[in-house]
Structures are given as C-alpha cells and as structure tokens.
Image (cartoon, helix red, strand yellow):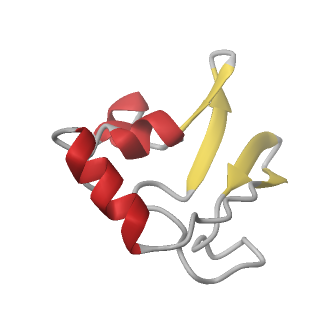
Amino acid sequence: MSLAHLSRHADVDSAMAEARSRTPPLVHPEPFEHEGARIICYPGDERHSVRERALRGPTRLHWRGGRFEPDGGLADLFGNA
C-alpha cells in the first residue's frame, strides 16, 4: 500500500511536500470473510471501524491467486482512485 501511495507522486519533492502537510496516516487493515473469501479493508471502507479514509485508492483487497488485490486487479492500486 505504501508503494501504491508513493506511485501517485511525480517526484520525491511531491511526496515529501505531502508528507510534511499532514501527520502520517494510521492504516490498520481489518480482515473479514465474505462468502468464503478472505478480505482486508482499510480506513474509509464501510466494514472498517474507522470511517475516515486514510489514503487514496481502494479500501478493500480480496485474496486471489496467492495475494491480496483490489476488485479491479493490481492496476487499481496504482490508479488515481
């Protein structure tokens, strides 16, 4: 998730400017199962105990093919969602 977040910045200066502008987000994934599938959700997801979104991007990852990924696949991690 950290790499996906950093990929949204054009350069180090952009990432550093954002980092200086706020306190570091607390990203505490919470696991659950739905219809036999393992899922983890992040702050801002309707199933997460913290309602305020911590980072841009998907708030829910599904266990598929030996890894957790968003509904739209790994490309969703590196988009502008």
User: How far across and how far down the image is residue 55, in percent?
Assistant: 47, 62
- Return the residue found at the far bottom: 51
Q: Quadrant of the C terminus?
A: bottom left
- Please indicate whether residue 27 sits to the left or right of residue 7 in the image: right
The residue lying at 42 percent from left, 32 percent from top is 73
Question: Is residue 81 shown above or below 75?
Answer: below
Q: Nearer the viewer, residue 40 or 23?
A: 23
Farthest residue in the top direction?
Answer: 66
Q: Quadrant of residue 32?
A: bottom right
Q: How many marks?
A: 0
Residue 59 shown left or right of residue 41 in the figure: left
Residue drawn at x 68%, y 57% is 41
Left/right placement of residue 30 relative to residue 79 reads right
State the residue in front, 69 or 50.
50
Q: Nearest the camera: 79 or 38?
A: 79
- Residue 4 in percent (x, y) is at 41, 38
Q: Position of residue 43 (x, y in %)?
A: 63, 69
> Is residue 7 found left or right of 35 in the rendered image?
left
Q: Position of residue 62 (x, y in %)?
A: 64, 40
